[in-house]
Image (cartoon, helix red, strand yellow):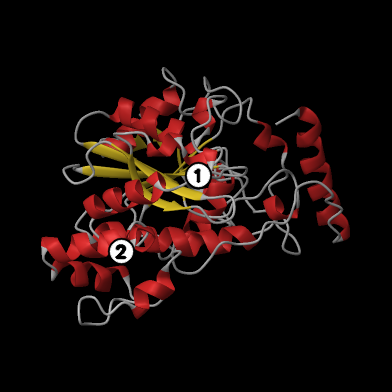
Amino acid sequence: MLRYARGVVAAALATAVVTGTAGWVTGDAQPVLAGPPPGSASWRADPVLGEELPDPARSTPAEVAAFFSGLSAAERQLLLLRHPSVVGNLDGAPVELRYRANALALATEDDPRYHSLAAPGRQILAFDPRGRGQVAEVFGDLRSARRVSVVVPGSDTDAGTFDREGDVYGTPAGMARSLHAEAGPGTAVIAWAGYTTPVGVGVDAATGRLAEAGAGRLTRFAEGLTADGLPEPAVFCHSYGSVVCGLAAPRLLATDLVVLGSPGMRADDVDALRTRARVWAAKDPTDWIDDVPSVRFAGLGHGTDPTDPAFGARRVPADDAQGHTGYFAPGTDSLRAFAAIARGTAVDTEGALR
């Protein structure tokens, strides 16, 4: 983001803290994409199996997993063919079935934003074309992985920017792909762009409205992984994604929460997150996020900087990362540290990762 935009962020938020008025004029308020997957109404009304199908809006991921475990391979395939958009986005459904369902859904999409997602070999774990589009993709063998990680991106992320060629390590796919390459065998990494993110510099970026909706979706997504028999993940949260993770923390099934380039987690310290996960934080000296005041007032701002020693997070070295989107760049200390966390081999002493 341009230095001008950084100044707007800092000045507007500082003004809000002092006066209690926002004064934000750039960035559009985004309608939240919520509720069950597309096609849920026809799924609920389908009598094909002679029994009621689990309601995507009400059934827990554990209930969904139990339902699919009781089906034959032919019955699973039948539901996949009749309702690919539901099966592909149903947390708790077997991941292999979701891959096939989303491949089928993508094959029928005319929107050019999604053409690359339909390429052979891509493992699309979630795909919702509504609005700006939401996507989750897996790197590695999720079923055999001993350790799983989830990357939660920040602002200006949607299906159209999921794996853009410019600023690769600032995209969900680029971050996840780089982490998986560094973490190595036995790991799998999921790029999860599964919530409505802020666009530009505006009130959405300074408030928790979109993060609150995203926190519920992230929590359910993680529950779906464990319901399908997968390990609890380490969750890497970039920029506004760390606000999502902070609000999800008390309910989020995770071994580790790693925040990078964070504007705050809407918590004063680690204890306030009420999580049993280990909490890590990284910020490089050139990251523009450092210009954003670490405050929270009248609903604006996200609170204490997680890299502040008073916050109590384990510190991740990031001095050689560049800018706001350089944390996953190959060769950086931050990526090496992230990979150790992803493998479950990270050891810290007095808050410093080694």
Q: Residue at x 81, y 31 (%)?
A: 4
- The residue sitting at 23% across, 44% down in the picture is 142
If the image is split into quadrants, where does the N terminus sit? top right
Give the image location of residue 120, x and y in percent: 31, 34
Quarter-wise, where is residue 263 in the image?
top right
Confirm or deny contact between disc 2 and disc 1 (CB under 8 A): no
Image-based side of 222 in relation to 265, left or right: left
Up the image or down, 261 lies above or below 220; here it is above
Residue at position x 34%, y 58% in the image? 84
Residue occupied by mark 2: 82
Local secondary structure at mark 2: helix
Q: Amino acid at mark 2?
A: Arg
Task: Return the x and y of residue 107 as percentages of the image width and height.
Answer: 38, 44
Amino acid type for the residue under numbered disc 1: Asp
Residue occupying the point 36% across, 54% down = 277
Q: Earlier in the sequence, mark 2 or mark 1?
A: 2
Dot 1: element:
loop
Where is residue 114 drawn, in percent x and y? 48, 41
**In the picture provided, is 202 more to the left or to the right than 321?**
right
> Is 58 located above or below residue 265 in the figure?
below
